[in-house]
Image (cartoon, rainbow, N blue to C red):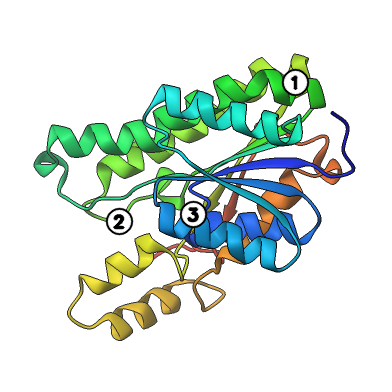
Amino acid sequence: MQTDFRVVLVTGGSYGIGRGIARWFARRGDAVLIAARDPQRGQAAETEIRAAGGRALFVATDVRAEESIRAMVARAVAEWGRIDVLCNNAGIERYARADEYSIEDFNAIVETNLRGMFLCAKYALPHLRAQRGSIVNVSSVQGVANEPSISVYAGAKAGILGLTRGMAVDFAPLGVRVNAVLPGATSNTGMMENALAALPDAPSAAAAVCKAIPLGRMGEPEDVAGAVYFLASPEASYITGASLAIDGGLLAKLAV
């Protein structure tokens, strides 16, 4: 099926960075499949985009479950006949000292943040290959440099960078590009909201985070969305295997 718009899969697309990415593509005329676990948020994201005149479809998806991913990919193809872009954004975060993570926590984080990306790419690849499409994986600055009590999440996010490079090399002969973005502190996301809510003085903590960032503010989901859109666009046709930090200069700053 030929269309005059691209078909974009966004995992974890019902909230935070993922919802910002889904909005960004939809506002520019693309059709967006919102893959997420929360039916209330997922349906709300679909309704919001459709109310603004965009194309969107929410499909309840658990990226930890292989059959759920296969069904999500099949639904996109049944609805629009193709897949042009896969944005692997779904992820969870839990704080604990490295030795204090439970094996259940470890498995949940790795299966969601890393294994799920692998499976989504695996099952979307035949359709991406047909369109000479692209994959954009959402990693994190935590995959490069870490704060305390986040080792398992950081390990999974670092794994995404290796997975991105490996897929970029493997899929280049098939015409499919694979890149990653590394968001820093980003407001209006579940992860940031939960982290601040756990602190006794959230406003002061948020101010301290902003002070540590060279650009002086947290990112917004739209900051990440614009970068994802660029990496998935024809303007980035010679970029693959790259990792782009969207962090306001955080990783560039030497802490002294």
Check whether the beta carbons of the residues at disc 1 and disc 3 lie within 8 A of each other: no
Check whether the beta carbons of the residues at disc 2 and disc 3 lie within 8 A of each other: no
Spot occupied by residue 183 in the image (x, y as percentages of width and height): 51, 55
| Residue 233 shows in this picture | yes
Indicate the quadrant where residue 132 lies: top right
Residue receiving disc 2: 147
Which of marks 1 and 2 precedes in the sequence? Answer: 1
Residue drawn where x is 32% and y is 33% of the image: 110
Q: Secondary structure at mark 2?
A: loop
Left or right: 38 as drawn, with respect to 201: right
Question: Closer to the camera: disc 1 or disc 3?
Answer: 3
**Disc 2 versus disc 1: distance between alpha carbons?**
38 Å
| Residue 148 against residue 159 in the figure, above or below | below
**Which quarter of the figure is the C terminus placed in?**
bottom left
Residue 42 has which mark?
A: 3
The kind of residue on which mark 3 rests is Gly
The kind of residue on which mark 1 rests is Arg
Question: Closer to the camera: disc 2 or disc 3?
Answer: 3
Q: Secondary structure at mark 1?
A: helix
Residue receiving disc 1: 129
Which of marks 3 and 2 precedes in the sequence? Answer: 3
Query: What count of labels does the image hold?
Result: 3
Indicate the quadrant where residue 8 lies: top right
Residue drawn where x is 48% and y is 59% of the image: 15
Spot occupied by residue 241 in the image (x, y as percentages of width and height): 65, 31
**Disc 1 versus disc 3: distance between alpha carbons?**
27 Å
The kind of residue on which mark 2 rests is Glu
